[in-house]
Amino acid sequence: MPSSAKPTDIDRLLGIMARLRDKDHGCPWDIEQRFETIAPYTIEEAYEVADAIARNDMPALKEELGDLLLQVVFHARMAEEAGLFDFAAVAAGLCDKLIVRHPHVFGAESQRDARAQTVAWEAQKAAERAAKRAGGSEPPSAIDDVPVNLPALTRAEKIQKRAGRVGFDWKEPGPAVAKVAEEVAEVEAALAGGSPDELAEEIGDLLFAVTNVARLSAVDPESALRRATAKFERRFRAVEATLAESGRRPQDATLAEMDAIWDAVKRLERAPPR
């Protein structure tokens, strides 16, 4: 590249990352990182992107997307140093995958609506998974390659979806709701006389069943739980604020008193606007 030419911002970013990882003149913290030490930051940045979207904070979204891009560049740089692949190979692989999975855009297939594209996308992904497993010691499974380190609710939902695509599924939420009732009874039995391991297993089964109800109801369980947690946080803060008006803290009040305040907060939230 001629010295007078201005590098693209991507080139500049890659250069900065290379400098940070330079063993003689780079940053000591950046130099000592490995894939496994950076991975938690990658996950954290993805959640911060989702949080900015949930808050509809576009300036924050721009910043968080940059932080997430840094994670990609960091991993790619470490891979390049190990002689595995580089950022260009990551981008090229993504380009190839997008083209293959969109033959209705880049190929000769007829145009698809969004639903048809979703079906075709999943079929293509299944074919790619089967190709990867070809010649392996284990037969391919519909639930191959669901990452084990996904949030538990998200992974449960993905595995349920995969099983559903091959027919192992209910067609509506009703039977799944009945399964929740069954699991609640088993949790109650474990509470009455089960071991701690049995109780943990039954609670896990209950969470899995509730996730299934959410999925069959077209509700994202991770988002639903986040909203429920945010609602609890909002109402609990209101309980604290109400107690503070009389100079008290939660630990100074009885559970019955706090429940009464909680119920009042709920009624206020649910009251129609005047």
Image (cartoon, rainbow, N blue to C red):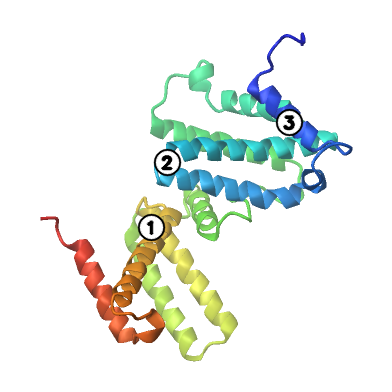
Q: Which residue is drawn at 52% across and 70% down?
A: 204
For the residues marked 3 and 2, what is the alpha-carbon distance in whole angstroms? 27 Å
Name the image quarter holding the N terminus: top right
Callout 2: SS: loop
State the residue position of label 1.
Answer: 227
The image position of residue 15, as x and y in percent, is 75, 27
- Screen quadrant of the C terminus: bottom left
Location of residue 95 (image quadrant): top right
Kindly identify which residue carries mark 2. 57
Tell me the crowding category of disc 2: few under 14, some 14 to 19, or many 20 or more residues within 10 angstroms, Cα based: few
| Residue at 65% from the left image edge and 37% from the top image edge | 70
Separation of marks 1 and 3 at Cα, in angstroms: 39 Å
> Could you say where residue 263 lies in the image, as x and y percent from the top left?
24, 74
Residue depicted at 63% across the width and 55% down the height: 149
C-alpha gap between disc 2 and disc 1: 17 Å
Q: Name the residue under label 3.
A: 16
**Earlier residue among tags 2 and 1:** 2
Report x, y in % for residue 71.
66, 40
Considering every residue shown, the one lying at the far front of the view is 247
